Amino acid sequence: MSGRDPLALLEVLHLTKFFPVRKGLLKRVVAQVRAVDDVSLIVRSGETLGLVGESGCGKTTAGRAMLRLIEPTAGKLLFHRGASDNGVPPEPVDLAKLSAAELKPLRRELQIIFQDPYSSLNPRMTVREIVGEPLLVQHIAHGTELTDRVCSLLDSVGMKPEHMRRYPHEFSGGQRQRIMVARALALGPKLVVADEPVSALDVSIQAQVINLLEDLQQEFGLTYLFITHDLSVVNHISDRIAVMYLGKIVELAQTDALFGEPRHPYTEALMSAVPVPDPDQPRNRILLQGDVPNPVNPPSGCHFHPRCRYAQGLCASDAPSLRDLGGGHLVACHFAETLALRPGVASS
């Protein structure tokens, strides 16, 4: 995958993150939780790549590992920094190999918007201190210049200059998320990981924040990795969508292609759960049997086969590889070419 896409901003190659399970008086490692299991994908410059899946599938862990907020167990994270002074693209930087000191300058270009604005803002800091902290840490602005930069950032997210003197508890959930967005933009990043940024908000506020993110992407040339479990949201905002199940990518395609012609049974089941705005329209929910398998001891072969209504003997014995069916539509299913799956419902 590496080096084949000229638009690549971040290439994730065989990313793995296991968490040890310890027991006994000596806390010996007795097992591993396979939270992210050999994930490979490309985030292209200027796009929004959606990463979807049910709770516990590993999507948040994958996003944080890509930014080195948690240390990956294995894999490469090749970050392309763009053209140098002589116009020749430099070699990509493997974020996974950098020390903390080497990674610090790159933090300017890699930011995150956390899911919960209530717990991700320091209640003892004013908005000026919260939004301005990255500028201080990176030695970019101080004093009056910092205040001016914070005013500009707040204005870009639809807030007023007088808000900088207030504390987080004085704002609504939507306003707090706007403060989180302003803080993420403070250093002028190239890649922003949005980790379920609207799931804790009311539906009407969700639309405002999503529209804000789209406007800021156009204004500042941002690239988003948008993590969510809401297919309606990701359908609206994403250029491409990657579907994750039990730590693995099972399907990745352009948004229209994924909704118009899903090729993996898990994707079909997810799309059948998307709410339909018309109460008279018939619903054909696909109810998956059983629970999500334990990531400590995942099923053999295809991880989805115990819950798949199309599973055959091969699925239990051989793990399918993620292969291209044409047009960049990647699927990890032995029978993707022969299954006739129902398309999703496009959002308005």
Image: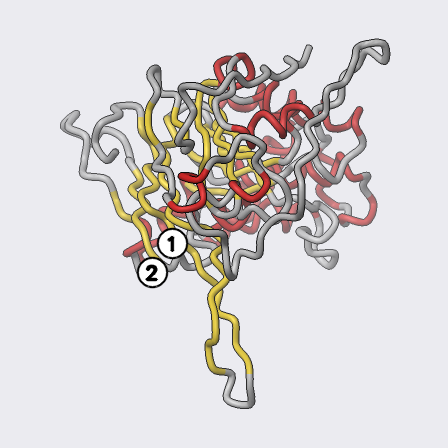
Residue 104: mark in rendering: 1
Mark 2, residue position: 101
1 and 2 marks in contact (CB < 8 Å): yes
- Residue 251: horizontal and vertical position, in percent? 45, 30
Q: Residue furthest right?
A: 279
Q: Amino acid at mark 2?
A: Ala
Nearer to the camera, 114 or 127:
114
Q: Is 307 left or right of 11, judged from the image as shown?
A: right
**What residue is at 44 percent from the left and 51 percent from the top?**
300
Q: CA distance from mark 1 to mark 2?
A: 5 Å
Quarter-of-image position of residue 269: top right
Question: Residue 163 placed where, x, y %?
Answer: 75, 38
Q: Nearer the viewer, residue 86 or 31?
A: 31
Using the image as rendered, state which of residue 131 and residue 258 is in the foreground: 258
- The C terminus lies in which quarter of the figure? top right
Q: Quadrant of residue 72?
A: bottom left
Amino acid type at circle 1 is: Lys
